[in-house]
Amino acid sequence: MASEYLHEPKHLNLKKDSDQPLLELKSLQTHFFSDEGTARAVDGVSYKILPGETLGVVGESGSGKSVTALSIMQLVPQPPGKIVGGEILFKGQSLLGMSEDEMRKIRGNEIAMIFQEPMTALNPVFTVGDQIVETVRVHRGLDKEEARAHAISMLEKVGIPSPETRVDEYPHQLSGGMRQRVMIAIAMSCDPSLLIADEPTTALDVTIQAQILDLIRGLQEEEGMSVLLITHDLAVIAEVAHHVAVMYAGKVVEYATVFELFDSPAHPYSLGLFRSLPDLAGPNEPLATIPGMVPPATRFPSGCRFHPRCSIATDLCKTDEPILGFLNGTDGRTVACHHIDEAAKL
Ligand SMILES: Nc1ncnc2c1ncn2[C@@H]1O[C@H](COP(=O)(O)OP(=O)(O)OP(=O)(O)O)[C@@H](O)[C@H]1O
Ligand SMILES: [Mg+2]
């Protein structure tokens, strides 16, 4: 069984599912408007993150993972993008009702994000120290010297050797792994309660990947923050996530604990994804690939958006969109499929 590959996430001292989530998305919709039509990139996304936990978000390219994260930060380019529906609750407060000034305080102080490509997120004309100093001066009101000392201690914390020297270097003088550590240092420098990490290790080689994940996990343990981790890599999910949201065509199709998902994926799409991973499929389980491709966000199919690729789809799936419903006998697991019983036999 795939679950034997899972490591118990020891660092998690989770509260019960019934406790107030740190972040909750309710039917979030973010669309892009252009001459080619409306791209419904995020189209009814619901998930929550509990205090101190890591939520993994998985799904094929184009499923809306990054746009959801950008929506939380309210950094979706507008136009062409716009949040057109739903709610984002952070510590029980609606982020969508906030002014740009209020949002600026949330970004950096409360929610920090590591972007998919660190080279584009770092400013090439400033030293790494200046970039951390800038962040902490704006958000924490430290004077120049205090901010510089803080920057050096943050670089040290994320494992950058000789931080007193590195602090005066420019992004291009650092390796990919170092740049990613700098991104994490900037994100962590204001002690956020939520860290959004969008594919934080994809561009890095395997050894460095493991180090960065350990770093994020260690910082999480120390600071008690929650992490929203977006990744294609199910092995990473297995290692660090507590809950997982599986996204397909702008929606969450399944939300479950990492154990439930690796042990018995319930949605046919989750099944396809988790079985297509060689390392995580059990020795006797055939490898499966999901036929077809993710539809473009301007042309989602009617009914269940996965139906053209699903082996158990019926006429009902072509016309009626399934809603995310609680799975009987579970503690908060949700799945959007008309035929869960049949899917369980796949
Ligand atoms: N600025 C934009 N203008 C128009 N469409 C956009 C824009 N940004 C994203 N999209 C569309 O939104 C959809 C979701 O994109 P998103 O970047 O969230 O996918 P993703 O799940 O993060 O994919 P990946 O795994 O490749 O990072 C895609 O169809 C994409 O083309
Ligand atoms: Mg992305």
Image (cartoon, rainbow, N blue to C red):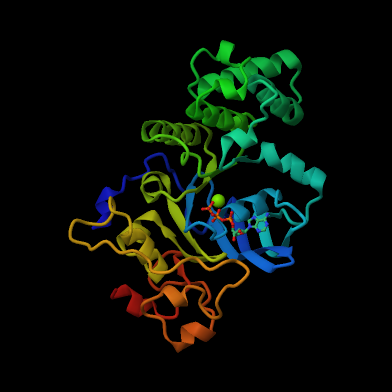
Residue occupying the point 43% across, 69% down? 292
* Left or right for 80, reference 243: right
The relative height of residue 131 versus residue 42 in the rendered view (above or below) is above
Indicate left or right for 319 with 208 as reference: right
Q: Residue at x 41, y 31 (%)?
A: 208
In this orientation, does residue 297 appear?
yes
Q: Which residue appears at 47% of the width and 49% of the height?
A: 231
Q: Looking at the picture, how far across and down is residue 111, in whole percent?
A: 64, 42
Reply above or below: 38 against 195: below
Q: In this view, does 95 lie above or below 184?
A: below
Image quarter hosting the C terminus: bottom left
284 left or right of 186 in image: left
Q: Is residue 191 visible?
A: no
> Closer to the camera, 97 or 246?
246
Q: Which of 134 and 127 is in front in this view?
A: 127
Residue 100 x, y percent position in the rendering: 80, 47
Instruction: Give residue 6's position: percent from left, percent from top.
Output: 31, 48
| Residue at the far bottom in the pictured view | 315
Q: In which quarter of the image is the N terminus?
A: bottom left
In this view, 280 is above or below 191: below
The x and y percentages for residue 141 are 76, 25
Q: Determine the residue located farthest toward the front in the rendered image.
A: 36
Residue 42 figure quarter: bottom right
**Quarter of the image where one finds residue 281:** bottom left
The image quadrant in which ligand 1 is located: bottom right
Q: Which residue corresponds to the image point at 51% horizontal and 74% vertical from the top-left?
A: 305
